[in-house]
Image (tube, grey):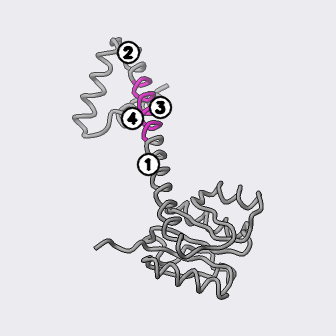
């Protein structure tokens, strides 16, 4: 049996629409871990946030305070964000996109489409995270390569080695110390900077 998608619901009022959204989520197989009325000034991430699969907001108007609060939560733990609102202003949409909102639905929700909207938003989020992780990995590899090249240059100059010999020295030190070549390269650079 498939595990229910766990969501946190953030609202800005205790009206009938909020109850309907919560009911629609439950009826569509979602597990609402917590409902937070953001107007009450609760700005810390809720207790169950770390285990949530998505963050869903329902706001009459998308205010900067709401977006800042959500942005601080997703900064600590990235999470798909879906907003249902009546606010179709370009400014609200632009600010929402900048903080990483994955779906921005104007004019409320349709209980028959809610499951599809949330699943698409979660899928988009996962795809984006995969791309972001790959980009981070590529950047890290490039930075590591720069460190290793710099350390090789130091060894070549100070020990009168050719490039392959310098590379082999760094690789052997890394294997002997069970560290990455980048860590060894950084150590060599740090030592040489202290000497100079």
Residue at position x 47%, y 40% in the image: 135
Residue at image mark 2: 156
Residue in the foreground of this view, choosing between 112 and 56:
112
Numbered disc in front, either 3 or 4: 4
Q: Nearer the viewer, residue 38 or 104?
A: 104
Q: Are marks 3 and 1 in contact (CB under 8 Å)?
A: no
The nearer-to-camera label among 3 and 1 is 1
Alpha carbons under labels 2 and 4: distance apart: 16 Å
> Element type at marker 1?
helix
Give the mark, 2 or 4, whose residue is nearer the N terminus: 2
Asked if labels 1 and 2 touch by Cβ distance under 8 angstroms, the answer is no
Magenta residue check for 24: no
Compared with 180, 54 (above or below) is below
The residue positioned 71% from the left and 55% from the top of the image is: 94
Q: Please name the residue that numbered disc 3 is placed on.
A: 194
Q: Which residue is mark 4?
A: 187
How far is the residue under mark 1 from the one under mark 4?
31 Å
The answer to whether residue 142 is magenta is yes
* Between marks 2 and 1 in the image, the one whose residue lies nearer the viewer: 1
Task: State if disc 2 and disc 3 touch (CB < 8 Å).
Answer: no
Residue 137 locus on image (x, y percent): 42, 41
Give the Cα separation between the discs numbered 3 and 2.
Answer: 18 Å
Asked whether residue 22 appears in the rendered view, the answer is yes
Residue identifier under label 1 = 130
Label 3, label 1: how far apart the Cα atoms are: 39 Å
Q: Which residues are magenta?
A: 137-151
Question: Which corner quadrant of the image does residue 186 belong to?
Answer: top left
């Amino acid at each position: 049996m498939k595990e229910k998608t766990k969501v946190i619901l953030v609202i800005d009022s205790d009206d009938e629409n909020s109850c309907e959204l919560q009911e629609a989520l439950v009826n569509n197989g979602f597990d609402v871990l917590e409902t937070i009325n953001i107007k009450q000034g609760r700005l810390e991430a809720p207790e169950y946030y770390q285990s949530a699969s998505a963050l869903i907001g329902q706001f009459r108007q998308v205010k900067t305070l709401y977006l800042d609060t959500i942005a601080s939560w997703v900064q600590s733990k990235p999470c798909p964000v879906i907003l249902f609102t009546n606010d179709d202003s370009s400014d609200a949409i632009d600010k929402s996109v900048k903080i990483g909102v994955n779906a921005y639905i104007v004019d409320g929700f349709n209980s028959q489409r809610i499951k599809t909207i949330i699943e698409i938003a979660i899928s988009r989020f996962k795809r984006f995270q995969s791309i972001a992780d790959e980009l981070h990995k590529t950047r890290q590899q490039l930075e590591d390569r720069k460190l290793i090249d710099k350390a090789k240059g130091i060894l070549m100059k100070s020990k009168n080695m050719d490039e392959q010999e310098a590379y082999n020295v760094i690789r052997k030190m890394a294997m002997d110390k069970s560290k990455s070549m980048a860590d060894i390269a950084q150590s060599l650079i740090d030592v040489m900077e202290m000497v100079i």
